[in-house]
Amino acid sequence: ETSHFFTPESLHHIHKQFYDHDAQWIIIVVGESELDFWFSVLQPTTGYQHFHRGISKLKQVTSCTHALPLSHAMPPGIMTSIHALMHFRYLMQSPCIDDDNLICISAALEKFHVNKHTIITAGVHQRKDNMAINNWYIPKLELMQNIVPSIHSSGVIGQWSADATEHAHIMEVKHPTRSTNNNNCDLQICRYLDHTNKCDRFDLAIGLLDGKLSIEGLEVVREEHKDDDIDENADVEIIPMEIPSRTQQSDQLHPIMNYFMIVKILQHKKVGSIPIPLCSFIVGRTALHFAYDPSIRNISIDEVAIIFNLPDLCPAVADFLHCEVTSGYCVHTISGPQRAGSEAELPFNKLQV
C-alpha cells in the first residue's frame, strides 16, 4: 500500500494542490477581475494576509490556510465540491485526530467525489492552453485516497515535512542551473557539482592540515611539561584549535574553537596566571564561553533600562555592588529580595553592555 511508505506532506499535497486546481476552477467560473475584486474588498484581519490586488496573478502559494469568498455567482455543484475539498484539507491538518475525525475526513472526500462531475460538466477543468479536460488524472487528487490510511499507520501529517528534499533540490539543481546558459543543462549541472565538490575537498584538506598543525602544537606543550612534579601547576600557553568546518568557504574565516581544550589547559595553569574574568567553563558535556568585549561601550544606565525594559536596573546594580563590598570581592551567590530603592545612587552613570 502506498500509504505505508509514502506519507502525505502539507506543502505539495494540500497547498499546491489547492492553488493549482481549486483556485483555477473558481477563477474560470467567476472570472479573474471579479474574484480579485472580492479579495480586495475583504476586511483586513490581523494575523492574516490581505490580498489587495487579488489572487489571480499569484505565482507561488505557501500559506497554511486558504479561504475563498464563494457566492451565488458559482454553480451549486461546483461550490459543494470545492467546499468539500476545503473541509477535507482543514480536517486533515488537525494536530490531534481520532477515529471520529477520520470518519469526517473520509466523508468530506466522498462528498467531493459525489459532486465532482459538475466541474467536468461546466468545462472549468482545463489545461494551461484552456482546453477542457474530461478526466481526473490528477496525482495529488489520487494521493488523497491515502490520507486516512496513512494517518492510521503513521500519525498526523503535521509531523512530516519535505524541507530536506526541497533544500537538496535547491542546492543540487536550482543553484547550479543559474550558472548554465540553458543549453545541455544536465551536463553543465553535473560539471558544476563536480567542480564544487573538488573545491570543497580542497578546502577540507587545507582545514585538516591547519588542524593537524594546531594539534601538534598542543602535543609539543604536553611533552614539555610531562616531567613536571605537579601537573596542576604546569604553566602552558593556550593554543586553541582552529579547524575550519566542512562547509567553510576559503573566503570565510570562522574557525571552530575547542573550548573543552581551552578549559582543560586553564586547569593546569598556576594560580594567579589565569586571565580574569573567567570566560570559559565546562558543565558536564557542555562548554560555555562568554564574550568579554562589550557590544555597547558607552551608554547611560537610564538608556539601558529603557532599551532592555529593565525598570529596576539601577536598584539591582546597587544591590550587586553592596554584595561585592560585603563579600570582600570574592565569589558569592546573588539572591534574596531587592533592598535598594528606585532612587538608589551609583558611583557611575555609564555602562558597557
Image: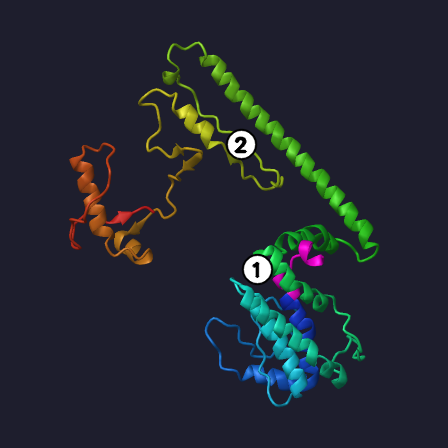
Please name the predominant secondary structure of the magenta segment in the image: helix
Residues rendered magenta in the picture: 1-13
**Residue 63: % across, % down:** 58, 68
User: Which quadrant of the structure image shows residue 117?
Assistant: bottom right
Left or right, 40 with respect to 76, comes to: left
Q: Residue at x 51, y 62 (%)?
A: 96
Q: Residues within 10 Å of mark 2 (few under 14, many from 20)?
A: many
* Magenta stretch contains residue 347: no
User: Which quadrant of the structure image shows residue 289?
Assistant: top left
Spot the residue most to the right: 184
Q: What SS does tag 1 mark?
A: loop
Q: Work out whether 65 lies above or below 181.
A: below
Specify the label residue 242 is tagged with.
Answer: 2
Look at label 1 and name its amino acid: Val
Q: Residue at x 58, y 37 (%)?
A: 245
Q: Work out whether 37 lies above or below 339.
A: below
Between residue 282 and residue 189, name the one nearer to us.
282
Q: Residue at x 44, y 13 (%)?
A: 225
* Magenta stretch contains residue 6: yes
Q: CA distance from mark 1 to mark 2?
A: 44 Å
Colour setup of the view: rainbow
Residue 314 shows up from this direction: yes
Specify the label residue 156 is tagged with.
Answer: 1
Left or right, 194 with respect to 13, comes to: right
Q: Residues within 10 Å of mark 1 (few under 14, many from 20)?
A: many
Q: What SS does tag 2 mark?
A: strand
Between residue 22 and residue 144, name the one nearer to us.
144
Q: Residue at x 38, y 40 (%)?
A: 293
Look at label 2 and name its amino acid: Glu
Left or right, 116 with respect to 37, comes to: right
